Image (tube, rainbow, N blue to C red):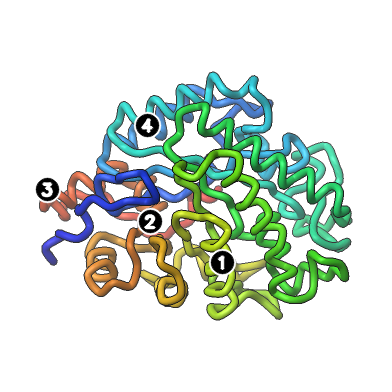
Amino acid sequence: MMRLQKLFEPTKIGAMTVKNRIVMPAMGTDFGTQDGFVSPKLVDYYEERAKGGVGLIIVENTSVDYPRGKAMPNQISIDHDKYLEGLSELARAIKRGGSRSAIQLEHGGRDTNSAITGQQPVGPSASLSQAGEPVKELSVAEIEELVERHAVAAVRAKKAGFDGVEIHGANGHLLAQFLCPSLNQRGDQYGGSLENRARFLLEVIRACRAAVGPDYPLWCRINAAEYGIEPAIDYAQAAQVACWAEEAGVDAVNVSAYGYGAQFAILCPGVPGLHLMGAAQVKRNVSVPVIAVGRILPELGEWALREGIVDMVAMGRALIADPYLPKKAAEGRPEDIVPCIGCLECLE
């Protein structure tokens, strides 16, 4: 086994020091309550993974606009102070386990349906949702309201005790829908050119940065590629968006990719390191740390870090399969790691 040295070196995101370079990315569990509260099951799930040795845990997509932006039946919410107690307990549990904690701010947009939200889906343009429902185009006033909702949610995350916030601009959710040229058919300042399509994301970043202050760790997740849809975001556009995001105030960029329709099944089992090329393109264009995700196991992560391709590596389903993967890898016990086999049962 390759000697895992870089993987377990400490690093920083903004003012936050992380004990190693392994990240647990945000992955929806549906373990919250039906009305958006953190459940004991959710707390136990994250605390167990923190005990396993991961450096940073990014808590799953958390709704800034409940229930309209709710993407799952039991998704947790951060759009009201009534959720603070549970969110604070979750942040404390992750810290008890020994990891840094962050939380992802998200709006489902057209990637939800009325059976979950009780409302018509919204998006950048009038269209049909992935569930086949009519999508209402957001007005400029509604976009401005959602910018403010993200900022208030970021302050609430800080108040709850999370070490940082991730703005979700990837994986088919609302901010990614605005970035996607196929889904964004607007004719105003939020549509058309890449600069216009990125405006919503950048306004959210600036508003969150102003709200939480200059020293609180804040970053975004973006797609470097989109599959199963054309035209789509590509590496060059992602690198440009990352540059603008850095100028707007992020402390890092988390690089992902997304597949629509049947292409989703191709992305999920995935080739090891499938998104590393996109992350590398982003890293060449920004000075803040870059996080890569996409079926990265310890030896591949070590290689990517040694080569300077990225600064941190995210291991998602691998930490569902074995929460103690980081500790076992650090102790030189690869044979004891329970591997993720890419069966996709966790998605069900």
Question: Label 1: which residue?
Answer: 223
Q: Report whether 97 appears left or right of 216.
A: left
* Callout 1 secondary element: strand
Q: Secondary structure at mark 3?
A: loop
User: Relative to residue 161, is residue 104 depicted above or below?
Assistant: below
| Number of the label disc, if any, that sits on residue 314 | 2
Secondary element type, mark 2: strand
Considering only order in the chain, which callout, 4 or 1, is on the residue closer to the N terminus?
Answer: 4
N-term-proximal mark, 2 vs 1: 1
Near-viewer residue (106 or 133): 106
Query: Which mark is first along the chain, 2 or 3?
Result: 2
- Residue drawn at (66%, 55%) of the image: 173
The amino acid type found where label 2 is placed reads Ala
Kindly identify which residue carries mark 3. Answer: 331
Q: Residue 265's x, y, as percent?
A: 55, 66
User: For this view, does 148 lie left or right of residue 337?
Assistant: right
At label 3, which amino acid type do we have? Answer: Glu
Label 4 sits on residue:
94
Camera-nearest label, 1 or 3: 1
